[in-house]
Structure formats: C-alpha cells, structure tokens
C-alpha cells in the first residue's frame, strides 16, 4: 500500500519506543520487516550508544546515513560518557553496513573514558570506502602508543593492504589531546595512513595539540587553507 520506507527520524520524546519497535522487527515476517532492506537513513536521539543498539542497527544492511544525535553532558568526571562501544563493536557495525556514507555516533566529549581507541578507525575506513562524514568517540589518553601498536595488531593485519575511504574531515569536537613533541609525527602519519585524504579536523579550536596536528597534517598533504 505504501512505498518502501527509506528515511526514518525520531524526536527525543519518542526515541525509546521506536527503538523498541525496531527490535521487534528482528525476526518478524510481516511486510514491516522489509524496512530492514529499504531503510537507508536513520536518525535517533538515543540516550546511550551501546552494544545492544549497535547489534540492532546491523540488521539494516543498506544503511547510508546513520545519525545518533546525542551529546555527553558535562565533563571532567561530572557525567559519564554516553558512548559504550569498544573497537570490536565498531568493527562489527561497519562490516555489516558497508554502504555507510555518514556515520555520526554522537559528538566526541571531553571525558576521554570510552573503550574505543584510534584502532577502530582503520576498520571504518576499510569497510566503508564511501564514507564522507564521521563522528565517533575514541579514547586519546594513549593515542601515540595506540597508533604505534596498530601495525602489530593481529586483528587489523588483514586490513592494512586494503583500500581506504576518502574522508576529508574528522570531527574532534571536545575530545582532549595532550602529548609531547615527538608524538606529533606519529599521530599525523597514523591518521594519514588510515584516512589518506584527510585534510582538516572539525572542532579543534582552543585545543592547541589538535590544532597543531591539524596544521601539520595540512602541511604534509600540501593543502592551502
């Protein structure tokens, strides 16, 4: 009776109920279950980005635009980060949704407590080669060592020779960054290895280390800004 549902957006007041409905589609045989095939755009202001939600979203294998419009409240220990995924969760999500062009999993916050690291960025780049925009939390506390460990990570070894996406801008938002001078080269080259077309970071104003990384990356890429 109706054309296939391709875009779906929910306001804050109804997010929980609609997520519950989507969960019921998991093994449903009614025509409504065809949404899993037709849906390409989903926007939800859910309170927490966790493993159960990521598992649910993996059913929508033709997803192009996934937007979780949520921000962590507070910082510095005043509030917990809403981002509860780890690197394995992110890998499974992007493997299931290779057509993603916009992956927005909430604005990175200043808490720096999430379980994801920069290692999660490589599966994103490899499995979603059409990616145009990315917002994701990752813990930058040990970012220099995390980049150094990527080549030796057995879980990522098979991904290293594969093509990457052409993402140009990465949204940093309030993500903290703090390391000594020798770490800049590691971070800049590590980012370019994962995102070869990366030119600029969004939201780096006021964070001098991210500003420096962005400037060095721009210089290395030979981009005029």
Image: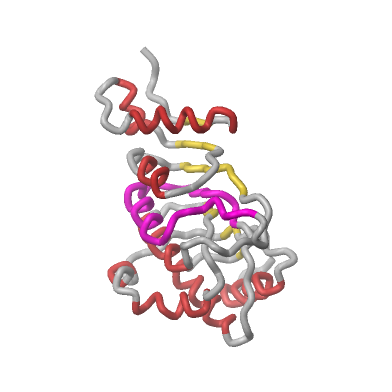
Is the N terminus in the top left, top right, bottom left or bottom right quadrant?
Answer: top left
Of 133 and 139, the residue lying toward us: 139
Of 53 and 161, the residue lying toward us: 53
Tell me: 117 left or right of 184: left
Image position of 30 with respect to 44: above or below: above
Image position of 44 with respect to 83: above or below: above
The residue sitting at 62% across, 71% down in the picture is 177
User: Residue 82: x percent and y percent?
Assistant: 55, 51
Q: Residue furthest front?
A: 78
Of 11 and 212, the residue lying toward us: 11
Is the C terminus in the top left, top right, bottom left or bottom right quadrant?
Answer: bottom right
User: Residue 152: x percent and y percent?
Assistant: 34, 79
Q: Which residue lies furthest to the top in this view?
A: 1
The residue sitting at 32% across, 33% down in the picture is 37
Tell me: 204 left or right of 63: right
The residue sitting at 38% across, 55% down in the picture is 89
The residue sitting at 52% across, 78% down in the picture is 144
Residue 109 within the segment the image draws in magenta? no
Magenta stretch, residue numbers: 79-108
Of 153 and 158, the residue lying toward us: 153
Tell me: 188 left or right of 181: left
The image quadrant that residue 126 belongs to is bottom left
Q: Which residue lies furthest to the bottom in this view?
A: 182
Residue 202 visible to an observer of this rendering: no
User: Residue 193: x percent and y percent?
Assistant: 45, 72
């Amino acid at each position: 009776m109706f054309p296939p549902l391709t875009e779906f957006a929910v306001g804050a007041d109804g997010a929980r109920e609609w997520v519950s409905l989507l969960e019921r589609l998991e093994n449903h045989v009614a025509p409504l279950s065809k949404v899993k095939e037709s849906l390409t755009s989903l926007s939800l202001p859910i309170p927490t980005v966790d493993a159960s939600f990521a598992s649910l979203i993996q059913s929508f294998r033709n997803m192009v635009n996934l937007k979780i419009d949520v921000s962590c409240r507070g910082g510095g220990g005043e509030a917990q980060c809403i981002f509860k995924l780890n690197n394995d969760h992110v890998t499974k999500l992007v493997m299931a949704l290779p057509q993603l062009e916009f992956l927005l999993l909430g604005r990175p916050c200043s808490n720096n407590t999430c379980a994801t690291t920069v290692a999660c960025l490589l599966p994103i780049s490899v499995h979603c080669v059409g990616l145009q925009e990315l917002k994701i939390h990752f813990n930058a506390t040990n970012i220099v060592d995390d980049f150094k460990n990527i080549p030796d990570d057995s879980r990522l070894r098979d991904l290293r020779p594969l093509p990457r996406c052409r993402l140009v801008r990465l949204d940093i938002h309030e993500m903290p960054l703090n390391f000594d001078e020798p770490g800049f080269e590691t971070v800049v080259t590590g980012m370019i290895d994962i995102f070869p077309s990366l030119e600029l970071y969004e939201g780096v104003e006021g964070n001098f280390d991210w500003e420096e990384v962005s400037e060095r990356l721009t210089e290395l890429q030979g981009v005029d800004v």
